[in-house]
Amino acid sequence: MLSDLDRTTQPASLHELKTQRQVSPQPSRSLRGDTARVQAIDVVRGLVMVIMALDHVREFWNPTLMRPEDVAQASVLLFFTRWVTHLCAPTFVFLSGISIYLYQQKQPSRALASRFLLTRGLWLVAVELVVITFILQWNYNLLLLEVIWAIGAGMVLLAGLIWLPRWLLAVLSFVILAGHNLLSPIQPVTADNAGWAMLHNTPFVLPLPGLPPLLVAYSLGPWLGVLVAGYVLGPWFKLPLALRNQRLRWAGIGLLLLFVVLRATNWYGDLTPWSVQPRDLVYTILSFLNVTKYPPSLLFLSLTLGVALLLLSGAEETVGWLSRRLRTFGQVPFFYFLLHLLLISSSAWLWTTLAFGKAINLSFAAAKEYPPAYEPSLLRAYVVWVSVVVVVYLPCRWYQRFKQQHAYWWLSYL
């Protein structure tokens, strides 16, 4: 989400900081085109954004009566179609924290970085409430607070937190991520306890006087812990490549081992214990992997961030057409995010209109509102997913080049 902030020059294996980007009301050549980026960040971010599109397509084009995570009913393919997308939000937020650190190192003062985080964070929250809410629903029946809100609100808080010592931020992140599962969900959520529920709770709807109800899908607390964790690990991306990759690899292995040990014991770290499934061993394994995203449990984050760290440890020197295309997506994440949501949502509107005689938002409709002729189809979802990724590539490549060649101030916000 801060792709234009993590750029560094890279002689040999050591990353150096780029000079501060100049801001001008007139178009001009910037230093962007002359500076290298941290390729691992762009590639991994691009990968999770491509995977993220699969989840959004599934919601609009292939909703099912059962939850995809329901190992008692869902097929293996449906389960993994949903499960693989769990990698997206934690990686997205974690990489935003790394990018914030790298951005701060390029600024002449911490105050400038803090001010930018405050304004960028408020902008993202506003976009979530005004733009993304409408794109996802085709109306304002609900105001949505999802992943963009979590990143934006986290930036607002980090604007103040970056003044603290790095060791203290590391302690804060550890306490949040390791300890928040000790807290019980708040039920019911009312105006009196809504503030606490927005920091740590399962998704809830809060009535707002004179406004549509507020759906809080992403409670801020755990995601702030992920954002701060990325910020704390930011200095690793200034180390020689071999040392950086070694640290990332061992950190990833450590998180995955933590996941296996804690998950095997059902002792701590997730609200939903795994169990032996009567269907067969495969579904028992799925039960073991089925960890809680809302709010993200310690085991959910250990598993997903463990994988993300391993990917980061091997992505810096990847080559080939796939790597180049992932880098393109990874360099324009916010543009991609808005564009792919708009394409998925509008095409679903057109499809349902043509197929069922009227537009119906299957992502937000209750099962009883599904048209009688509607049938779920994973094949349809995968075809649409691939089509969306292909269609958005050229606009993303154009915007990537536009950002490299210009230094408008507003490019930092889109």
Image (cartoon, rainbow, N blue to C red):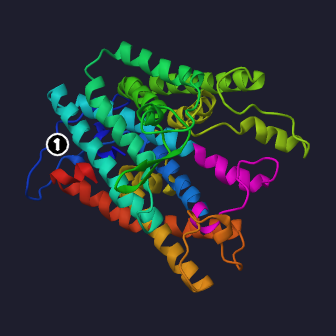
Residue shown at the point (59%, 44%) measured from the top left: 86
At mark 1, the secondary structure is loop
Residue shown at the point (55%, 74%) measured from the top left: 360
Q: Nearer the viewer, residue 4 or 334?
A: 334
Residue 347 in the image, given as x and y percentages of width and height: 50, 74
Q: For label 1, count other residues whose C-alpha is less than 10 Å away and answer few (under 14), some (14-19) or many (20+).
A: some
Q: Quadrant of the C terminus?
A: bottom left
Residue shown at the point (55%, 36%) measured from the top left: 295
Circle 1: residue type: Arg
Residue 315 shows in this picture: no
Residue 126 in the image, given as x and y percentages of width and height: 30, 51
The image quarter containing residue 404 is: bottom left
Q: Is residue 203 left or right of residue 27?
A: right
**87 lies above or below 158:** below
Q: For the magenta stretch, what is the residue range?
A: 59-86
Residue 190 in the image, given as x and y percentages of width and height: 47, 39
The image quarter containing residue 160 is: top left
Q: Tell me the residue that label 1 is attached to.
A: 21
Q: Is residue 398 left or right of residue 80?
A: left
Residue shown at the point (38%, 30%) measured from the top left: 13
- Residue 123 falls within the magenta-colored stretch: no
**48 lies above or below 170:** below
User: How many numbered discs, if any?
Assistant: 1
Residue 172 in the image, given as x and y percentages of width and height: 42, 18
**61 lies above or below 206:** below
- Residue 74 falls within the magenta-colored stretch: yes
Residue 251 shows in this picture: yes
